[in-house]
Amino acid sequence: MTASPPADGAPRTVRALPAAFSFEPWTTALVMIDMQRDFIEPGGFGESLGNDVGHLAQVVEPAKALVAWARMRGLLIVHTRECHRPDLSDCPPAKRLRGAPSTRIGDPGPMGRILIDGEAGADFVPGLEPLPGEVEIVKPGKGAFYNTSLTHVLVSRGITHLIFGGVTTEVCVQTTMREANDRGYECLLVEEATGSYFPEFRDATLAMVRAQGGIVGWTASLSDLVRV
């Protein structure tokens, strides 16, 4: 049985690109992608790939502000983590052996085994942990719909619109947005709350998302969103 919408569930419209984005809080979820220590903090998997994790650290405070806004508005909040089983049975060799990192998925690192569920590095950065009643999705791939319960979670709650933040913009965030678009969800990406190790990749992804009249979705600034 579905409960009645809260009093604060009136439709809202935010200034966005390529046009205004309208949504009802009662049928909208915030999806925060992979705000994990292994990607964002020194010593994690991101740094082992030779990346400057400082680019992602800049996203943490805007992400916290976005989550706080969503909680205030009564949105469903979904937090994803990309990580694998300790035996790596859900990590194909094509993923684990790609590139030339100093440490690979499953190898020991400063925060435990790299990207392994239950290890400290696979956990959320401080301040972005789920609260009771929020949804946590552990995903073995880049997209949050692949081999997870996310579809069931959204359908069972009548969700039609998704607001996104997280990292990295061009990989897991964009992959999940495209998966969501194919499933019929209307998607908005919050510009300050997403980031990449390569700032030019972030900017290019924002442009791709909203190109051709919003072929994947919309983008909006955090400052405009929190006003609605």
Image (cartoon, rainbow, N blue to C red):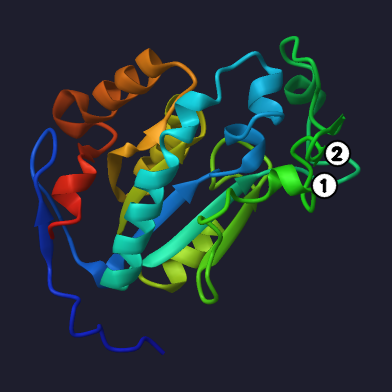
Distance between the alpha carbons at the discs numbered 2 and 1 = 5 Å
Q: Secondary structure at mark 2?
A: loop
Mark 2 near mark 1, Cβ–Cβ under 8 Å?
yes
Question: Could you tell me which residue is drawn at 41 percent across and 30 percent down?
Answer: 195
- The residue at the far top in this view is 100
Q: Which mark is residue 93?
A: none
Q: Between 113 and 43, which is closer to the camera in this rendering?
A: 43
Can you give x and y, in whole percent of width and height, for residue 225 in the image?
18, 51
Q: Which residue is mark 2?
A: 88
Q: Which residue is mark 1?
A: 85
Question: Could you tell me which residue is drawn at 65 percent across and 22 percent down?
Answer: 47
- The residue at the far right in this view is 87
Q: Secondary structure at mark 1?
A: loop
Question: Could you tell me which residue is drawn at 67 percent across and 17 percent down?
Answer: 49
Q: Between 146 and 69, which is closer to the camera in this rendering?
A: 69
- From where the camera sits, is residue 140 visible? yes
Can you give x and y, in whole percent of width and height, for residue 62 in the image?
35, 45
Question: Could you tell me which residue is drawn at 18 percent across and 46 percent down?
Answer: 223
Residue 28, compared with residue 7, is above or below; it is above
Label 1 crowding class (10 Å Cα cut-off): few <14, some 14-19, many 20+? Answer: some
Count of labels in the image = 2
Can you give x and y, in whole percent of width and height, for residue 61 in the image?
39, 46
* Dot 1 amino acid type: Arg
